[in-house]
Image: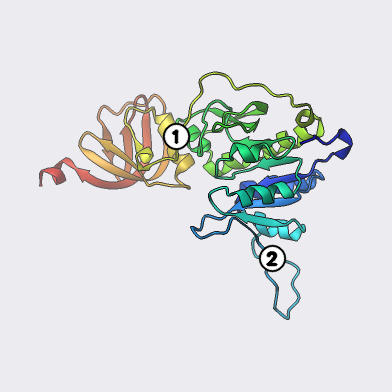
């Protein structure tokens, strides 16, 4: 397929996303930059979902005039308000799906939080391929939940990567990256919001300055990491962790999952809140429970509140 020339810019974009705040933020930033997508594509996970279908805006029937027809805008409602068509695709990547997307005639397809792996046959359709906003500094934290694992590890910094897709998973060449220092106690939502803003800026800049047109990009470094969706085991805190890591993990991730548990030599606690930590604290015993719970970590002391699930006495009884 022949690439459009520079005069055809801004390119015809399709945005793959979900009805999520991050996808919505990228859409709004594109609109603000004068790069209105020609279509939005979202997944339809229903087992009987058609290969591809239009999602039409509801018809308002109220006799009372309203200035805001939607109580809370998501990506879908915002697209409707801008006159951008929304298409839902079923699982399986059928030939009908690929042909329908090809018919839209996009120059470039951008991804913001789309959950499915894109097949090579689809990657080859748009002249400038696919660009994905990935919320980590690749090759670190490839996979579907990079912010989770960044906070789970208690990392002090992260970043966002704009990269082209290839046949692998989050392994395509890098177009641009931006680092972000993390404040202790940041929530998953706060980190995601900041990284999405940075990622949208990288995408818009790469289009405006011609980086997308020129094809300038670099291969990812060797190594890196890949993590899957977190299981329930990821919500078990080890006493071998530092108090700082445990604090960052629990504070950052409690809003999206849990509850967190910590198993000690003679007690198990379900953590309901984390209040702070002393990086060099020493208790002289595994924990102190006075309503608040102080736990000896390695190193430091973690200050929490929680529910005692089992103790030595209960096990003996």
**Sequence-wise first label, 2 or 1:** 2
Farthest right residue in view: 7
Q: Residue at left 62%, top 42%? A: 193
**Above or below — where is 25 with respect to 201?**
below
Farthest left residue in view: 317
Element marked by disc 2:
loop
Image quarter in which the N terminus is found: top right
Q: Is residue 41 left or right of residue 248?
A: right
CA gap between label 2 and label 1 equals: 40 Å
Element marked by disc 1:
helix
Instruction: Tell me the number on the disc at residue 35.
Output: none
Farthest top residue in view: 222
Color theme of the render: rainbow
Instruction: Estimate how packed mark 2 is, as few (under 14), some (14 to 19) or many (20 or more) residues with alpha carbons within 10 Å.
Output: some
* Residue 169 vs residue 224, the one in the foreground: 169
Farthest front residue in view: 95
| Camera-side mark, 2 or 1 | 2
User: Which residue is the site of mark 2?
Assistant: 57
**Above or below — where is 201 with respect to 19?**
above
User: Which residue is the site of mark 1?
Assistant: 152
Q: Where is residue 40 in the image (x, y as percent from the top left)?
A: 69, 51
Q: Residue at left 68%, top 41%? A: 110
Q: In this view, does 299 lie to the left or right of 114?
A: left
Instruction: Estimate how packed mark 1 is, as few (under 14), some (14 to 19) or many (20 or more) residues with alpha carbons within 10 Å.
Output: many
């Amino acid at each position: 397929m022949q690439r459009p020339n520079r005069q055809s810019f801004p390119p015809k974009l399709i945005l793959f996303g979900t009805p999520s705040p991050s996808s919505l933020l990228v859409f709004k930033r594109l609109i603000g930059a004068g790069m209105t997508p020609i279509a939005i594509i979202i997944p339809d996970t229903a087992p009987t979902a058609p290969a591809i279908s239009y999602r039409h805006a509801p018809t308002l029937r109220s006799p009372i005039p309203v200035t805001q027809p939607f109580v809370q805008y998501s990506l879908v409602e915002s697209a409707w308000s801008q006159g951008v068509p929304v298409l839902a695709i079923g699982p399986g990547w059928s030939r009908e799906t690929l042909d329908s997307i090809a018919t839209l005639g996009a120059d470039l397809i951008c991804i913001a939080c789309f959950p499915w792996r894109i097949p090579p046959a689809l990657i080859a359709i748009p002249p400038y391929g696919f660009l994905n906003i990935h919320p980590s500094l690749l090759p670190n934290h490839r996979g579907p939940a990079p912010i989770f694992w960044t906070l789970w590890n208690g990392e002090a910094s992260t970043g966002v990567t704009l990269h082209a897709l290839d046949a692998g998973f989050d392994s395509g060449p890098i177009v641009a990256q931006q680092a972000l220092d993390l404040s202790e106690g940041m929530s998953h939502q706060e980190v995601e919001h900041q990284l999405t803003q940075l990622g949208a800026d990288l995408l818009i800049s790469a289009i405006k300055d011609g980086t997308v047109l020129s094809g300038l990009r670099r291969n990812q470094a060797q190594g890196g990491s890949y993590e899957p969706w977190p299981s329930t085991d990821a919500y078990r805190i080890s006493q071998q962790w530092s108090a700082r890591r445990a604090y960052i993990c629990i504070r950052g991730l409690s809003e999206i999952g849990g509850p967190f548990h910590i198993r000690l030599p003679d007690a198990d606690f379900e953590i309901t809140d984390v209040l702070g930590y002393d990086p060099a604290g020493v208790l002289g015993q595994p924990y102190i429970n006075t309503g608040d719970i102080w736990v000896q970590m390695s190193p430091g002391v973690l200050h929490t509140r929680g529910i005692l699930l089992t103790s030595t006495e209960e096990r003996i009884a």
